[in-house]
Image (cartoon, rainbow, N blue to C red):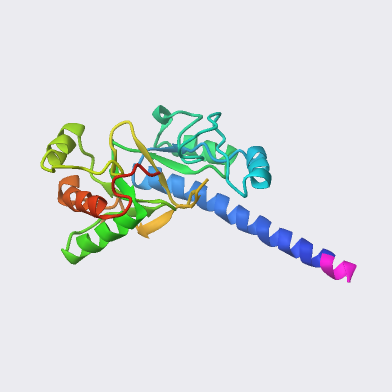
Amino acid sequence: MREILGRRRRLKWSSQWSKAKRERSALRAAALSYAAQWKWPVLPGAGSDRAATDRDEQHRGGDRACACPRPDCAVPGGHPYDPGLLAATTDPTMIGWWWTNRPDAPVILATGGAVSAVSLPAVAGARALATLEETGVRLGPVVATPTRCVLLVAPYSFEELGELLDRHDWVPSSLRYHGRGGYVVLPPSRIAAGQVSWARPPRPGPDGGAPRLPRISVIVDTLVEAGVGSPDGSRLAY
């Protein structure tokens, strides 16, 4: 019996190791694809502090800690830390080096250059996506985090955004804008809150290049309405 239990433990460990290896390989491949093929500037995210995570699991029921020094980090694991956001690049050599040294690091997209984004809480996001699809709007890639829905859009200026939002009497504070100087987490990253995935997978352009991105002016009114109408529409949520 002891031999059978030992064999089962070895098989379980081997399976977990193989899964972890595949996930690490997928992160590096995704980062290289975004940068080299689509020209999206990326960098590694803070990720989780494994030692702190172990302590958290013992004392707080499994919360995952961020590798950054902030004990009250608002987006644990899912933000730039070292290097900082300005280091984002499309250079495959640099990206390969980063993920060779930190294979578990989340993939962070620096927004405002090749691509921007707008995000809202998951409940409101599901409502907005349904409305946009019903009205025939052609969406670009959409990222799903455990708490939010992130729509990737063509780059926009904050002046343009201000004019669009000025048409509304009230805009929910939970609607967030990721333009120049901002960032979002891309799949297949795992952050403290859980797995990041594609709600609407990217469709490469006809030449195999970057996916087509809608203009924010086409979708922002629907996002505002969805945010206002959802239970958490007035609450800042990560």
Q: Position of residue 218 (x, y in %)?
A: 15, 51
Point 27% across, 60% down: residue: 127
* Observer able to see residue 43: yes
Taking the image as shown, residue 133 lies to the left or right of residue 204, namely left
Q: Is residue 4 magenta?
A: yes
- Image quadrant occupied by the N terminus: bottom right
Point 68% across, 46% down: residue: 58
Taking the image as shown, residue 162 lies to the left or right of residue 185, namely left
Taking the image as shown, residue 90 lies to the left or right of residue 14, namely left
Segment tinted magenta in the rendering: 1-5
**Secondary structure character of the magenta stretch overall:** helix
Q: Position of residue 235 (x, y in %)?
A: 33, 44
In the image, residue 142 above or below residue 54: below
Taking the image as shown, residue 20 lies to the left or right of residue 98, namely right
Front residue of 208/59: it is 59
- Image quadrant occupied by the C terminus: top left
Front residue of 7/36: it is 7
Front residue of 155/39: it is 155
Total residue callouts: 0
Q: Position of residue 222 (x, y in %)?
A: 19, 53
Residue 201 sits in quarter: bottom left
* Observer able to see residue 203: no
Point 43% across, 40% down: residue: 108
Q: Position of residue 122 (x, y in %)?
A: 36, 54
The residue furthest right is 2
The residue furthest left is 167
Residue 237 sits in quarter: top left
In the image, residue 177 above or below residue 149: above
Point 56% across, 54% down: residue: 23
